[in-house]
Image (cartoon, rainbow, N blue to C red):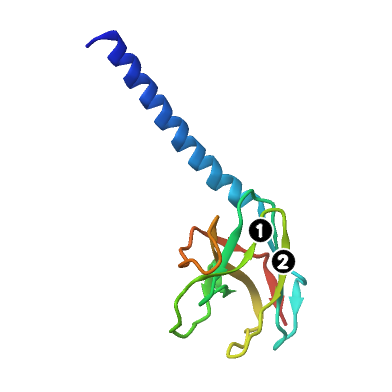
Amino acid sequence: MKTYVKIIIFFLIMAMMVIVAWFIWDRYQSSKNIFIKTDKIEYKEGENPKIIIENRFKKSICFSSCYPYYLEENKEDKKFEAYEYGTCYNPDIAENCVLSGKTKAFELILENIVLDKGIHRIAIPACIGCYLEENFKRDKWLYSNEFMVK
């Protein structure tokens, strides 16, 4: 094989490795720079939790119009399980975006769900870098801190 072919192959392999490393680093950074926390660590039964989402990542993050969050209860051995949700009959689009460098707060209105006493958290499916009213495609699960319902 000629020397210049070997050099081209070498540079192509190096370029692919750099691209793969960049995607891995980008995913790692997104999880380290998006913070979700509840406004309290303890709620009374029937009280609606409030969450604060801080986006220090370089891209916007958006949430589902159908299921913007899942409430999860800590079952035995610290295994979290989501509460049951009904079927969403509307198109699932990206909604409620948090731009890079911004913070938003939401109150979760619990109409048909009564949280059991115990330890809970909020799981939020998010799309990274998507736009409002685009079809929602989950890129990442984000989790709040754990909180107690008494």
Q: Distance between the residues labelled 1 and 2?
A: 9 Å
120 left or right of 6 in image: right
**Image mark for residue 150:** none
Quarter of the image where one finds residue 107: bottom right
Q: Earlier in the sequence, mark 1 or mark 2?
A: 1
For disc 2, the neighbor class at 10 Å (few under 14, some 14 to 19, many from 20) is some
Residue 78 at what x, y percent from top left?
57, 66
6 left or right of 77 in image: left
Quarter of the figure with the C terminus:
bottom right
Q: What element carries label 2?
A: strand
Q: Total number of numbered labels?
A: 2
Residue 53 at what x, y percent from top left?
69, 63
Residue nearer the viewer, 115 or 110: 110
Q: Which residue lies furthest to the left in this view?
A: 1
Residue nearer the viewer, 20 or 49: 20
Residue 28 higher or lower than 21, as above or below:
below
| Residue identifier under label 1 | 99
Residue pictured at 54% horizontal, 40% vertical: 25
Q: Which amino acid does label 2 sit on?
A: Lys
Residue 139 at what x, y percent from top left?
49, 58
Residue 5 higher or lower than 109, as above or below:
above
Q: Which amino acid does label 1 sit on?
A: Leu
For disc 1, the neighbor class at 10 Å (few under 14, some 14 to 19, many from 20) is some
| Residue identifier under label 2 | 104
Tell whether label 2 touches label 1 (CB within 8 Å). Answer: no
Q: Is mark 1 on a helix, strand or loop?
A: loop
Residue 84 at what x, y percent from top left?
49, 82
Residue pictured at 42% horizontal, 28% vertical: 15
